Image (cartoon, rainbow, N blue to C red):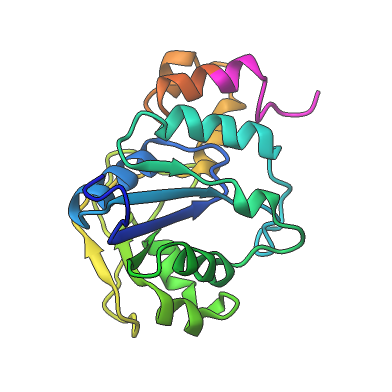
Amino acid sequence: MTDMAQPRRVGMFGGAFDPPHWAHRALAETALSQLGLDVLHILPTGHAWHKSRILSSAEDRVAMCELAFGDLPDVRLDPREIQREGPSYTADTLRELQREYPQAELFLVLGADQLLAFKSWVRWQEVLELATLAVANRATNIGADASLDQDMETDLSGVDLPFELLNMPLKNISASAVRARVGQPALSAAALDVLVPEAVARYISQHHLYQPPT
């Protein structure tokens, strides 16, 4: 960290991280280097008001985040949204970070899919007042059936919001694709490594996550 006493550039990267995968890892690395962040808070979602499915346990998602991001310099795994009662909103977290880093510039790190849905967020105008949006583009198809080598980017030309585009190679991986592929009986642990860091793949296997009901 460039200034241990008072970070000047602080990032927030939130998500379900169910599980954290290589695209999440690449986005964290890109944000740290390209934005010159002094610290990047990784925030697993608590009560996900916008998701219809039930998330894996907070304990499992925090453990996988530690395995996926823990070795990156200037990353801080931040459990506050998991510990917060009731729905957890980005605006609340940014307000808290603003109080903790009163002189810092705040950046909200997100993917193109989140940017396109941004105006559906609770208090999105407040989020824009508090932080600069730092966006990584994504392939047009990142679903469970997506090819890992596709190269067609999501069109962001119609987005009427201020944001900084991160220069990151496309990573056509999504958590839904990882969960779907884990359920395939022919999938080996080595095959899962192309989707998630090796330590996360081991954790998923050891804890029998994302297995179809029997």
| Residue 136 in view here | no
Which of 123 and 160 lies nearest the eye of the viewer? 123
Which residue sits at x=21%, y=48%?
2
Question: Quick check: is 207 in the magenta stretch?
Answer: yes
The relative height of residue 208 versus residue 145 in the rendered view (above or below) is above
Which residue sits at x=52%, y=50%?
43
The residue range painted magenta reads 203-214
Q: Quadrant of the C terminus?
A: top right
* Outermost residue, front side: 5
* Outermost residue, right side: 214
Image coordinates of residue 41 in percent, x first then y, are: 43, 50
Q: Quadrant of residue 85?
A: bottom right
Q: Is residue 70 left or right of residue 166?
A: right
Which residue sits at x=26%, y=56%?
152
Question: Quick check: is 208 in the magenta stretch?
Answer: yes
Which of 130 and 196 lies nearest the eye of the viewer? 130
Q: Quadrant of the N terminus?
A: top left
Image coordinates of residue 201 in percent, x first then y, are: 49, 21
Q: Is residue 24 left or right of residue 149?
A: right
Which of 119 and 69 lies nearest the eye of the viewer? 69
The relative height of residue 144 versus residue 11 in the rendered view (above or below) is above
Q: Main secondary structure of the magenta part?
A: loop
Image coordinates of residue 131 in percent, x first then y, are: 38, 72
- Count up the numbered dots: 0
Image coordinates of residue 195 in percent, x first then y, are: 41, 31
Q: Quadrant of residue 23?
A: top left
Which of 18 and 30 lies nearest the eye of the viewer? 30
| Residue 76 in view here | yes
Which residue sits at x=57%, y=26%?
182
